[in-house]
Image (spheres, rainbow, N blue to C red):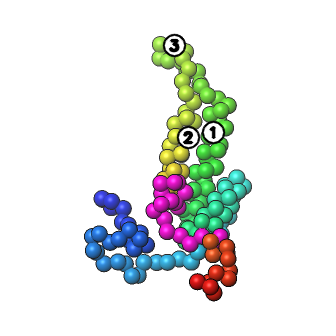
Amino acid sequence: MKGRKRKPTYLKLIQGNRGKRPLNKKEPKPPRGIPSPPEHLTKKVMLAWGLIAAKLDKMGVLTIADAWALEQLAENYEEILTLRKTVRRTRFQTVVTATGSKRKVHHPAWQQLADTEKRFRAMMEQFGLTPASRSKVNADPDDEKEKDPAAKYFN
């Protein structure tokens, strides 16, 4: 699809509907909650899944429909950690050129790490996990609901 990404209905309600286009009244609203992790995940990715899912659930942005996006986020995070270990261990690699001379070049993991970090950053923005993207997300975090249970009777 060409052009800008469509703005979700909740953002139109918050920021105003400048285009005056009709709001989508049938937009799906999946229930909040932590989706079950797929069984094919490795132990390291499963650990990342748990850490990320707990944060997103506490922020109030995770729904049961977000399993695939959460899987991608966890996979990218685990890949970043693995590539960082490789980069720390082997910063440079010696290559022999066509003329027979030797020179040091960055290990190929540097480029893989940069690509993975870009994908990870894009997924973080989808969930509102960066300071700039957080301002665009409207959520109802659990901790705000639980601060004062009696407040609902006295307001």
Say which of 99 and 140 sits in front: 140
Reply above or below: 58 against 85. below
Q: Residues within 10 Å of mark 3 (few under 14, many from 20)?
A: few
Q: Look at 33% across and 59% down and name the residue there.
A: 4
Q: Which residue is mark 1?
A: 84
Query: Can residue 100 be seen by looking at this rendering?
Result: yes
Q: Which residue of the protein is positioned furthest toward the bottom in this rendering?
A: 153
Q: Look at 67% across and 73% down and name the residue there.
A: 147
Q: Residue 26: x, y in percent? A: 41, 81
Reply above or below: 101 against 110. above
Q: Residues within 10 Å of mark 2 (few under 14, many from 20)?
A: many
Q: Amino acid at mark 2?
A: Leu
Q: Look at 47% across and 54% down and name the residue there.
A: 132
The residue mark sitting in front, 1 or 3, is 1
Q: Amino acid at mark 1?
A: Arg
Q: Amino acid at mark 3?
A: Gly
Q: Which residue of the protein is positioned furthest toward the front in this rendering?
A: 154
Q: Tell me which label, 2 or 1, sits earlier in the chain.
A: 1
Image quarter where the C terminus lies is: bottom right
- Which residues are drawn in magenta? 127-143
Q: Disc 3 versus disc 2: distance between alpha carbons?
A: 29 Å
Q: Residue 76: x, y in percent? A: 58, 51
Q: Disc 2 versus disc 1: distance between alpha carbons?
A: 7 Å
Q: Look at 41% across and 71% down and name the residue there.
A: 14
Q: Which residue is mark 2?
A: 113
Q: Are marks 2 and 1 in contact (CB under 8 Å)?
A: yes
Helix, strand or loop under label 3: loop
Q: Which residue is mark 3?
A: 100
Helix, strand or loop under label 1: helix
